[in-house]
Image (cartoon, grey):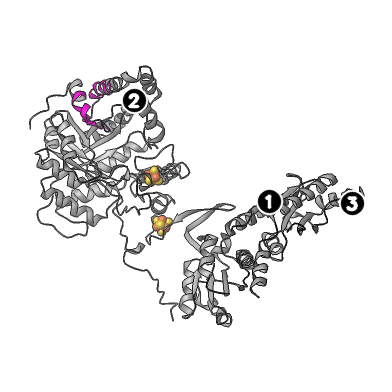
Amino acid sequence: MITAEQKPMQEIIQYLAPYSKILLVGCNECVTVCAAGGRKEVGLLASALHLNSLKQGKTIDIKEITLERQCDPEYVEELTSYIDAADAVLSMSCGCGVQTIATRFKQAHVYPAVNTKFMGASLSQGVWAERCQGCGDCMLGITAGICPVSRCSKSLLNGPCGGTSNGQCEIGPETDCAWRLIWERLKELGIEGRYEALVDAKDWRPAGGAGPRKIIREDLAL
Amino acid sequence: MENYEPEIVAFCCHYCAYTAADMAGSKRISYPANVKIIRVPCTGKVDAIHIMKALEKGADGVYVAGCLEGDCHFKTGNARARLRVARVQKILEDLGWEKERVAMINMSAGMGERFAKTAFEFTEKIKSLGPNPISQGKIEVQAVS
Amino acid sequence: MKTESRLEKVLASGAMAVTSEVGPPRGVDPEIVRKKANMIKDHVDGINVTDNQTAMVRMSSMAAGIIIKQMGLDPIIQMVTRDRNRLAMQSEVIGAAAFGIDTMLCLSGDHPKFGDHPMAKAVYDIDSVQLIKAVKDMRDEGKFQGGADMKAPPKMFIGAAANPFADPFELRVMRLAKKVKAGVDFVQTQCIFNLEKFEEWMKGVEDRGLDKQVHVLAGITPMKSVGMARYMKNRVPGMDVPDEVIKRLAGVSKEQQPEEGIKIAVESMERLKEIKGVHGFHIMAIEWEERVAEIVEKAGMYPRPQV
Ligand code: SF4
Ligand code: SF4
């Protein structure tokens, strides 16, 4: 899923300083799962913003709404009845949702309340780690199911650099060396011979090197 | 400000802190009237938003009183409560407020005296911090009008 | 002979080669480069010019390499894939070759996190193995990475690094095999302090017959002090400094430690010379270029062969 983290409170407060009627929009998908921008976080952020403006003797009018999916125009449409009453929209979804709102409502001043981080998986309750960079040409089939693009700090495709230390990446002991993991798994699977194949320089076009990417499914795009 | 009497909300677990408060009452151990008790079935039931709402409504301090660590009737309710209190503390810090306005406290049902003592101590702490910062806003508004 | 490289000629003659390195300055003064190169020039067959080593901005390796070339010496320019994409790297190889530079080293480079620009975006368009292949494709096939033919291809003797000590250890021979497959001509190893482990690695290299396909130059770093030894043991990723080395340095007075460090280096070289497949040495005297000549002499490797 896409992971995100709430922005620093003071940055949000600064964005909103000129406005008094805020439409605060959460999203029910990824950001709910990673506890960055679901209904709960919408409530807490609204409350914090209330406290802040009460202290300043101002009133701030916050309409809280959490959409099923903010990156989908169909759901964003639900904001139509609230948008005119708001001076600004504060979105708690990933950047895709923020942009879907900005695209749909041309006049709206839209601000992000979270920093969109990475595509990751949940390791344990409250812990998420990067697992994919959407390179558009998945190599997991030759790397035993461990991604060298997103998990090796240098995106090396032909094996570990000389910096691996006690099985960890040279950037620090809190990061596993992806190539150590790949190697161990290749061995476990009894296919370590695969390591010897030279991997050619990657074509980065599918990864975004050819400009912004788009998927068009003719069978669906009626 | 001298005669300021803070308003304090205490979310008290039915199985421990609330019973302890009861015991304090029956033993005639007094505790400050500033503390308004809200009984909850377990502190795990108290969410961050409840603490925030209490502050929004003007409470000067909020604490959550649950069972001793490891003694939660529902296993980990009090541990969750502790994390939620920490979350609210972080929000207060981010806003530039004193995080000490909210606290997590643990006690067992038999600790009537501890209940009273904690209530005193917390009240004193909030007194020293002064009123909920939102009162500054009210004063400004009055000054303007 | 694939190239005009002096290093290639020395190695082809069957003699043990010696290389050392010069770190370019963090400013424009070419005299610094010349001074450092002059200190070692008579005792080596090639001078590595590091490329923004430890991810700190310095005079570019190509520019410093040209300065050294113009002194009539033999630079080995290092190139890390961290800072440039394949387009920039190919153009730089061509540029270097146009100035007569004929030997280079293909590396992935330290992560920017360690340098003075930790906020920079690392490039890593390709890795060091792919860079080896790219340079070889230019040299032997006259092909750019994009597939087009090139006129007047650069004739580079291609080097790489090998770290026998980083883990997983068992992968380290295969890693070299991959570089060989990609077309590397020589490798310079990480500084060797743990000789047993190095011998074990070389055994693996020999078992696979890699010693016949690539020249291994053993990495030597003289320790200046016990403090440096400890630092390298604990703080430098992928470095293997056994306790005996530290004990030996700690066992002599502070004033004696540099001499002891040099002694250890020379003794290591004597022992490494005996290993089949070791075709020379790469001496990395970190900010200690003035002692390189002495080390080479003490190891009995002076004068250098005339090729
Ligand atoms: S190889 Fe590419 S698509 Fe596959 S997991 Fe890694 S980044 Fe994602
Ligand atoms: S230590 Fe491993 S994960 Fe880190 S950069 Fe080197 S190969 Fe990649």
In the depicted view, which residue is nearer to us: B116 or C40?
A: B116
Observer-nearest of B131 and C158: B131
Q: Numbered disc 2: what chain? A: C
Q: Residues within 10 Å of mark 2 (few under 14, many from 20)?
A: many
Q: How many marks?
A: 3
Quarter of the image for residue C58 reads top left
Residue furthest top as drawn:
C252
Q: Quadrant of ligand 1?
A: bottom left
Name the residue that disc number 2 marks.
Answer: C225
User: What SS does tag 2 mark?
Assistant: loop
In the image, residue C272 lies in the stretch drawn in magenta: yes
Of helix, strand and loop, which one carries label 1? Answer: helix
**Residue that label 3 marks:** B25
The reply to whether residue A97 is in sight is no
Q: Is residue B88 left or right of residue B75?
A: left
Asked if the residue at label 1 sits under 8 Å from ligand 2, the reply is no
Query: Magenta part of the protein: which range?
Result: C266-294
> In this picture, is C247 found above or below A17?
above
Q: Label 1 belongs to which residue?
A: B82
